[in-house]
Image (cartoon, rainbow, N blue to C red):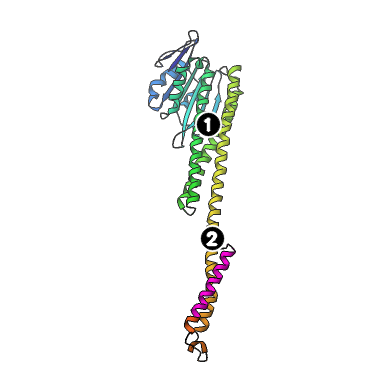
């Protein structure tokens, strides 16, 4: 637990084992394996509403915001390096902010270092919440950059090998994943909007302006994920177009080969008939003459195609 003294402007890193003073602001963070250590502390000293206490220790599958008399509970989600969603539960009161996650997240290490480097960021519980959500938004944008790189990689694969079945599987997987993340971020935008417009004591006039700016950051993240979905549809159209172009090229080549061999096949068919009255068959130079005619027809046809830039 980080404990900030508003009178001395000093910050201490201590274990949560006692009440928080009137002139102190605390940030308590615990992970899944630390539940038993903090259970009694939360119950005895923070005294949240019964529903908030229950939500804090169970899985909540979508972002939510519940406002109580003098505190509030909210659930948000962080995006991991594997582009999965990890639940973050937050309980905030007038002089404390408590965050809870099931698994360790590097995000909170950065938040802790930020508070230790700038203790004044903990001057008010609203400021603490703002910096946590701001770091969460930055994490979202960072992961969005990575996702953009993955999409560009898939687009490159489409150009290299449009007939690869793996590309279709990747696109389907990414579209499903992006749909889930986009839906979550959309709900987080609404959650931040609710916080900025709430009348809770930890949202004062000064911190309210910061939350309005935070709403813009989450909206940027939402717009990015909506753009990613459009890009995925564009990649599908691109792959379909490249496949069609490749097939057209194949059909064009086969058609030209057919055009070359049609007259050759016609002549071969005529002289392949075993009629007795065919003087060319008894001509001494009939066989080489036929070959000369066949090669001339093929050469003239190919030359015509090349002149018209069809081949």
| Labels 1 and 2: the sequence-earlier one | 1
Mark 2 Cα within 10 Å, few/some/many (few <14, many 20+)? few
Q: Which residue occupies 54% across, 74% down? A: 297
Q: Which residue is mark 2?
A: 249
Q: Which residue is mark 1?
A: 63
Whole-percent x and y of residue 105? 43, 29
User: Bounds of the magenta span?
Assistant: 290-311
Mark 1 Cα within 10 Å, few/some/many (few <14, many 20+)? many
Classify residue 39 by image quadrant: top left
Figure check: 66 above or below 297? above
Q: Quadrant of the C terminus?
A: bottom right
Q: Residue furthest toward the top?
A: 7
Q: Is residue 78 visible?
A: yes
Q: Main secondary structure of the magenta part?
A: helix
Whole-percent x and y of residue 200? 58, 19
Q: Is residue 49 visible?
A: no
């Amino acid at each position: 637990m980080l404990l900030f003294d508003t009178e001395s402007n000093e910050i201490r890193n201590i274990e949560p084992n006692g009440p928080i003073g009137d002139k102190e602001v605390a940030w308590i963070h615990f992970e899944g394996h630390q539940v038993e250590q903090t259970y009694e502390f939360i119950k005895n000293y923070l005294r949240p509403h019964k529903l908030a206490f229950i939500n804090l220790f169970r899985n909540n599958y979508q972002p939510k915001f519940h406002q109580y008399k003098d505190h509030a509970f909210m659930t948000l989600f962080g995006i991991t390096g594997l582009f999965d969603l990890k639940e973050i539960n937050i309980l905030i009161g007038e002089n404390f902010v408590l965050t809870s996650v099931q698994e360790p997240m590097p995000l909170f290490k950065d938040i802790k270092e930020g508070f230790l480097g700038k203790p004044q960021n903990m001057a008010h519980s609203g400021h603490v919440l703002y910096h946590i959500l701001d770091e969460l938004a930055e994490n979202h944008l960072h992961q969005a950059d990575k996702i953009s790189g993955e999409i560009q990689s898939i687009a490159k694969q489409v150009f290299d090998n449009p007939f690869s079945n793996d590309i279709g599987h990747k696109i389907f997987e990414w579209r499903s994943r992006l749909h889930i993340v986009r839906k979550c971020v959309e709900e987080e935008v609404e959650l931040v909007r609710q916080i900025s417009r709430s009348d809770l004591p930890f949202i004062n006039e000064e911190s309210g302006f910061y939350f309005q700016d935070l709403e813009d950051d989450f909206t940027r993240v939402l717009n990015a994920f909506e753009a990613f979905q459009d890009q995925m549809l564009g990649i599908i159209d691109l792959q379909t177009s490249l496949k069609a172009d490749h097939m057209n090229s194949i059909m064009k080549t086969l058609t030209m080969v057919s055009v070359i061999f049609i007259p050759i096949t016609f002549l071969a068919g005529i002289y392949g008939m075993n009629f007795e009255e065919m003087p060319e068959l008894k001509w001494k130079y009939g066989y080489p003459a036929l070959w000369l005619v066949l090669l001339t027809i093929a050469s003239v046809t190919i030359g015509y195609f090349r002149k018209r830039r069809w081949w």
